Image (tube, rainbow, N blue to C red):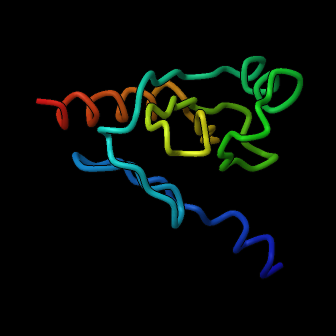
Amino acid sequence: AVIVIAWGRGPVVVDAEELRVGPNRITWEWTGEITALDRDATVALLGPEADPRAFLQTRPWLHEAVRLDITDSADPHPYWIIGTRDATALAEAMTRASSAASR
């Protein structure tokens, strides 16, 4: 039970400077397009359309995700996939924070 509880804990924090997903973080200056993914798009990006270099933070019980493209050529991850219960709300919060950071 402790393993499942610990596995399920990976808070996503969106603020004006950066995105934090569990212990991982990236500042908005290195991010590109933000896309809310429905169930079918999430399955596709976690399966047949997956890039093995992608950063993944999701759980089996999360059926939606947000794709965040990474623009830093030094970063080994071309994009992040972040599982969520409400991909639209998370993508909107990320877009607002990213826009505010670029002002």
**81 or 89, which is in the foreground?**
81
Q: Position of residue 83 (x, y in %)?
A: 64, 41
The residue depicted at 45 percent of the width and 35 percent of the height is 90
Query: Split into 4 quadrants, where in the image is the N terminus?
Result: bottom right
Seen as rendered, the residue at the extreme front is: 74
Seen as rendered, the residue at the extreme bottom is: 2
Q: Position of residue 25 (x, y in %)?
A: 44, 56
Give the total number of marks visible in the rendering: 0
Q: Image quadrant of residue 84? A: top right
The residue depicted at 10 percent of the width and 30 percent of the height is 103
For residue 72, side relative to residue 18 (left or right) = right
Q: Is residue 58 above or below residue 10?
A: above
**25 or 97, which is in the foreground?**
25
Q: Image quadrant of residue 2? A: bottom right
For residue 18, side relative to residue 63 (left or right) = left
Q: Is residue 38 above or below residue 89?
A: above
Q: Position of residue 26 (x, y in %)?
A: 41, 50
The residue depicted at 17 percent of the width and 33 percent of the height is 100
For residue 35, side relative to residue 94 (left or right) = right
Seen as rendered, the residue at the extreme left is: 103
Q: Position of residue 31 (x, y in %)?
A: 40, 34
Seen as rendered, the residue at the extreme right is: 48
The residue depicted at 79 percent of the width and 29 percent of the height is 50
Q: Is residue 20 above or below residue 29?
A: below
Q: Is residue 64 above or below residue 18?
A: above
